[in-house]
Image (spheres, rainbow, N blue to C red):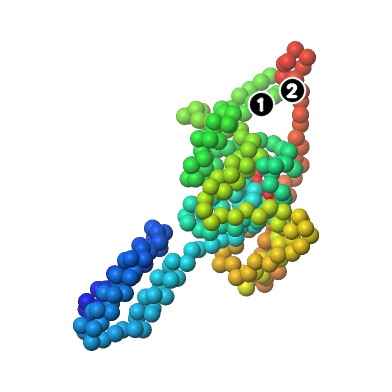
């Protein structure tokens, strides 16, 4: 009997190992355990079938791959998708727009992003930091243009002289999507706009702009809302009772200025 429990314990250990290392439980090891179980039960004239079934269920549960649905393929969606994929999840990412890699300028936000240490850390974790930095423009200081025409620099890091990097938002988004495609079990669905999310059932419905149809994905275990400022996921969550929500706008507006150089190629600010 004690032998059996050792065996059963081994099951759990292997199951736990499988869960933590995310490696598939080897079929031969699994068969060995089955035979071993059977033989020991014969020796001890007992067959703990119930326990065995529980163990099998445990193993099957652990062997079924975890999956995630990510709504929105912007910066947060594509980055988190890579993180999940790296952790062996099956990832299904749904993006309302068409594939930005096949389109021209990205709509709306054209400004470059200033990538700081936090963004770099996130990219490092999926092995993309160097690729981004090679493309980025280092920015060591902020330039203040006085009304009298005087210039004054404010360094971002006067102590260690570190810098932030100006990177193209589109480029960043593109390499994140391309990186995601390198992982197995990852699917990106463009032109799929979330129109409904049922929190209780885990069902999500998308409107396919390609052919004006709707598609419903049912029984999702985990759904990530990464669909930006006017999040459709959040709107659906707001229909739940006790869900608090507030939104405030900054007082000043936002404007992008394009100031071309002078005829002799001087800065005209
Ligand atoms: C002008 C400006 C300058 C900024 N500068 C910086 C900076 O320098 N550094 C910095 O770190 N951050 C900066 N930010 C903030 C940064 O841009 C945001 O934090 C970041 O874009 C948020 O990413 P996101 O993926 O959540 O949203 P988004 O980038 O907006 O992506 C959301 C995605 O979801 C998709 N989507 C929307 N609705 C649906 C739907 N119903 N179904 C499916 N998909 C949907 C959209 O098409 C989009 O692709 C700036 C923001 C702005 C506006």
Q: How far across and how far down the image is residue 151, in percent?
A: 66, 20
For the question of whether residue 14 can be seen, the reply is no
User: Which type of secondary structure does the marked residue at label 1 adopt?
Assistant: strand
Spatial CA distance of label 2 from label 1 is 10 Å
Residue at image position (56%, 48%) is 180
Tell me the crowding category of disc 1: few under 14, some 14 to 19, or many 20 or more residues within 10 angstroms, Cα based: few
Instruction: Give residue 162's position: percent from left, percent from top.
Output: 50, 30
**Residue situated in front as seen by the camera: 251 or 225:** 225
Quarter in which the C terminus is drawn: top right
Q: Residue at 72% across / 57% down in the picture?
A: 193
Q: Residues within 10 Å of mark 2 (few under 14, many from 20)?
A: few
In front: 41, or 122?
A: 41
Mark toward the start of the polypeptide (2 vs 1): 1
Residue at point 54%, 31% (across, down): 134
Circle on res. 64: none
Check the picture and name the quadrant holding the N terminus.
Answer: bottom left
Left or right of residue 42, residue 87 in this image: right
The image's mark for residue 269 is 2
**Residue at left offset 51%, top offset 58%:** 89
Give how far across and how far down residue 206 sits, in percent. 71, 62
Q: Nearer the viewer, mark 2 or mark 1?
A: 2
Q: Which residue is tagged 1?
A: 144
Q: Quadrant of residue 4?
A: bottom left
Query: What SS does tag 2 mark?
Result: loop
Residue 7 as seen in the image, left or right of residue 86: left
Q: Position of residue 183 (x, y in %)?
A: 52, 50
Reply above or below: 134 against 24.
above
């Amino acid at each position: 009997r004690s032998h059996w429990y050792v065996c059963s314990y081994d099951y759990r250990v292997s199951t736990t190992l499988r869960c933590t290392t995310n490696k598939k439980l080897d079929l031969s090891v699994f068969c060995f355990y089955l035979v071993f179980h059977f033989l020991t039960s014969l020796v001890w004239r007992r067959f703990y079938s119930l326990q065995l079934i529980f163990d099998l269920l445990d193993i099957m549960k652990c062997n079924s791959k975890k999956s995630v649905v990510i709504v929105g393929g912007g910066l947060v969606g594509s980055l988190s998708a890579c993180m999940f994929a790296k952790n062996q999840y099956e990832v299904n990412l749904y993006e309302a727009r068409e594939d930005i890699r096949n389109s021209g300028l990205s709509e709306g936000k054209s400004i470059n992003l200033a990538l700081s240490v936090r963004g770099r850390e996130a990219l490092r974790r999926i092995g993309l930091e160097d690729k981004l930095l090679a493309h980025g423009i280092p920015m060591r200081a902020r330039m203040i243009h006085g009304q009298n025409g005087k210039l004054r620099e404010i360094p971002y890091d006067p102590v260690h002289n570190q810098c932030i990097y100006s990177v193209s938002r589109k480029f960043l988004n593109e390499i994140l999507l391309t990186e995601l495609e390198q992982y197995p079990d990852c699917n990106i669905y463009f032109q799929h706009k979330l129109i409904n999310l049922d929190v209780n059932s885990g069902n999500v419905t998308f409107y396919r702009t390609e052919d004006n149809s709707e598609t419903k994905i049912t029984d999702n275990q985990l759904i990530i809302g990464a669909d930006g400022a006017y999040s459709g996921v959040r709107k659906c969550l707001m229909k739940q009772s006790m869900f608090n929500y507030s939104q405030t706008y900054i007082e000043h507006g936002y404007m992008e200025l394009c100031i071309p150089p002078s005829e002799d190629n001087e800065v005209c600010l």
